[in-house]
Image (tube, helix red, strand yellow):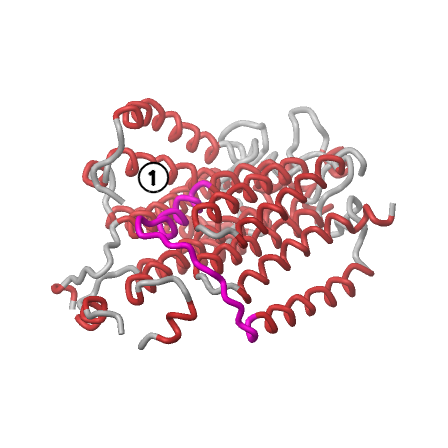
Amino acid sequence: MSHSGMSLIVREVTKLVTGFIALYAAYIVLYGHLTPGGGFVGGVILACCFILTVLAFGKDFADRMITDAGAKIWDVFGAMLFLVVALVGYRAGAFFANFLPHEGNFRLFSAGMIPVCNVAIGIKVAACILGAFLALSVFRPGQVDEEKE
Amino acid sequence: MGAHATLPFVLAVVLLGIGVYAIACKKNLIKMIVGVIVTEYAVNLFLVLLGYRSGGAAPILAEGQAPADLVQRAVDPLPQAMILTSIVIGLGVVALMVAMALRIHEKYGTFDLSLIRRLRG
Amino acid sequence: MTDVLPVLYPLLGFMVIASVIAIEAKDLLSTVISVSAAGAGLAIVFLLLGAPDLAITEVVVEVVSMVFLIRVAVRRDDTTYDQARDMFNVAAGLVFLGLIVVASVYAFRWMKPFGAPEMTMSRPYLERAFTDTGAANAVTAVLLDFRAYDTLGEATVIFAAIVGAYAVLRHVGRKRDVALRNEPHS
């Protein structure tokens, strides 16, 4: 996999399209309780948006957006947010209890803690898939890092 | 109508058999990974086929619909919820298998299992 | 039952044929493309069976899986591999296939027919999904409120798989591997 990116047409189209892909991912994650979707799908679509940027512009440009260590930190942050929501529900009666108001009006914030859980799962899955892709793309056979003994 | 009651399940089991044949009988590492992917497709397909109700709709409540009406018309949402997580877990497993295949190719220079067994470990 | 079957059977047949082509192809690029075509067929089958969440998920996961497979399989020094028969492998494969056939024949006898599921556990979930959780999407309500422990387990499994991939791909200083690669193959 070369580090220099792709041709001019691919780069121009990527500049136009990545914003829409990220917006679509955010829509699917946030409206997961009203339309088909949810945290898992939105997370993988958001990871696809980053993968497109890395493939079109090369790794050196994408390092300014998110690095390998940054992907791991966001991954753990998503998992911790999901656990915190579960444990806070413990105070309301049971583990994973739905403690925010959920009267069900087909609005964005009318399903209790479900949108918060969707956002946490979306961040976690996106960072996982992006981290796996970055680790696979920088792998060079035969390379030895001497300082990591 | 007897054949139509089980023929979709039979096709899913045929797909499962193809995947298991690829895992057991093929020597190329990439064909084994493809066999695992085909087995995952077969299992997900079988479980979603189990929950299908004829003439059913997706289990999403519309704006003015009563929940009792949804119970009459919807397909089973429980297999769908489990298969949704299973598909994303399958992606993680493919990433892990691809990482191991890259390491094996770095160490032995080939994907062919019969050659790898003869080289020194 | 007759409304979806005329389209379901050709799609399932397409998936079976694409999988057979993927496994028996001589070069690896055809394998990757055929298995991605089978995944796209599966996404259309999910849409026909009333599962739009699964259809979106399958399409996007198929795209990322194809990126990973192309990373490992398509190389500049690609050679075509001939598949010599090994008797132990073929015997083991036949034994497994025989077990699958026997188990499925036994299981199909007391399974419900296609299109008439039991739904003993899903009826309360469908009735109370909107009133108890406020979510109109019953699949999300099942995943994140009624069965949230399973979602926690899923997050753990994905985390473990990705950390395993990180651990395999790490570069630690091991001079043995470099020496093995640099010496001529005996």
Residue A93, position in %: x, y? 53, 53
| Closest to the observer, C46 or C147 | C46
Residue A66, above or below C88: above
Location of residue C108 in the rendering, given as x and y in whole percent from the top left corner: 78, 59
Tag count: 1
In this picture, residue C185 sits left or right of residue B91: left
Q: Does residue A135 appear in the picture of this structure?
A: yes
Image side of residue B115 versus residue B27, left or right: left
Determine the residue positioned at 69% across, 69% down.
Answer: C99
Q: Which residue is the site of mark 1?
A: A51
Q: Residue at horizontal 78%, vertical 47%?
A: C114
**Residue A51 on the magenta segment:** no
**Magenta residue span:** C63-89
Secondary structure under the numbered disc 1 in the rendered image? helix
Membership of C76 in magenta stretch: yes
Is B40 or A31 nearer to us in this picture? Answer: B40
How far across and how far down the image is residue A91, in percent?
47, 52
**Quadrant assignment, res B111:** bottom left
Above or below, A103 against C180 in this view is above
**Quarter of the image with the N terminus of chain C in it:** top right
**Residue B14: percent from the left, percent from the top?**
67, 55
What residue occupies the far right of the structure in this picture?
B1
- What kind of residue is marked 1? Ile
* Picture residue at 63% right of the left edge, 57% below the top: B16
Residue at mark 1: chain: A
> Residue farthest to the left?
A147
Decide: is A103 above or below C163: above
Q: How crowded is mark 1: few (under 14 residues within 10 Å), some or many (20 or more)?
A: some
User: The C terminus of chain C lies in which quarter of the figure?
Assistant: bottom left
**Along the line of sight, which residue is nearer the eye, C48 or A25?**
C48
- Residue A93 seen in this snapshot: no
